[in-house]
Amino acid sequence: MNVLKGKITAIKTTDSISIVTIQVASVFFSTILIETPDTAPYLQKGNSIKIIFKETEVIIGKGTTHLTSIQNKIPGKIISIEKGVLLSKLIIDTAVGKITAIITSDATDQLQLKTGEKVTSMIKTTEIMLSQ
């Protein structure tokens, strides 16, 4: 699991759903929760929080333009690649710390990923969990 520490900077709520914005270093993350400040008291602007996401939920982009609906985009540099028969484990150095991504080895080949290369790690808002 990727675990990063940050602070809640904004909360938008409608009915029982909230979009929470968390600042980790200089990067802002968004997540969608089926919680509100009324049902989860830890959801308060300024509170420290951990964001958690699985290595398999990290999407890797190569190049400078990534027009997608994914809001959580973190540029970085690949510092290691462990390539297996089916899956590859990438460690990416970013402004928020090291992020681990697990992608298919076919994708590693298709993108021609190499150690030292600049990439963008992307995580969907629905794949980020919060923890106190």
Image (spheres, rainbow, N blue to C red):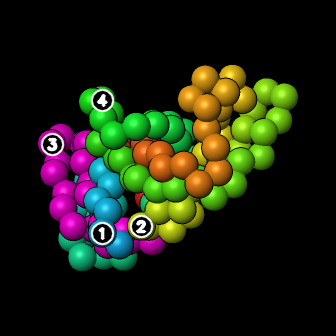
Callout in the foreground (1, 3):
1
Q: Earlier in the sequence, mark 3 or mark 4?
A: 3
Q: Position of residue 48 (x, y in %)?
A: 36, 76
Q: Earlier in the sequence, mark 3 or mark 2?
A: 3
- Circles 1 and 3, Cβ within 8 Å, touching? The answer is no
- Circles 4 and 2, Cβ within 8 Å, touching? The answer is no
Q: Which residues are magenta?
A: 1-24
Q: Position of residue 32 (x, y in %)?
A: 32, 44
The front one of 64 and 8 is 64
Q: CA distance from mark 4 to mark 2?
A: 21 Å
Left or right for 47, reference 126: left
Magenta-span inclusion, residue 16: yes
Rendered position, 48 above or below 105: below
- Circles 4 and 1, Cβ within 8 Å, touching? The answer is no
| Label 2, residues with CA under 10 Å away: few <14, some 14-19, many ≥20 | some
- Circles 1 and 2, Cβ within 8 Å, touching? The answer is yes
Left or right for 29, reference 80: left
Residue topped by disc 1: 26
Three-letter amino acid code at the position of disc 4: Thr
Magenta-span inclusion, residue 91: no
Q: Earlier in the sequence, mark 4 or mark 2?
A: 4
Q: CA distance from mark 1 to mark 2?
A: 7 Å
Left or right for 113, reference 67: right
Task: Tell me what residue is drawn at x 19 percent, y 57 percent.
Answer: 11
Residue topped by disc 3: 14
Q: Earlier in the sequence, mark 1 or mark 3?
A: 3
* SS at circle 2: loop
Q: CA distance from mark 4 to mark 1?
A: 21 Å
Task: Say which quadrant the N terminus sits in.
Answer: bottom right
Residue topped by disc 2: 95
Callout in the foreground (3, 2):
2
Q: Position of residue 36 (x, y in %)?
A: 26, 53
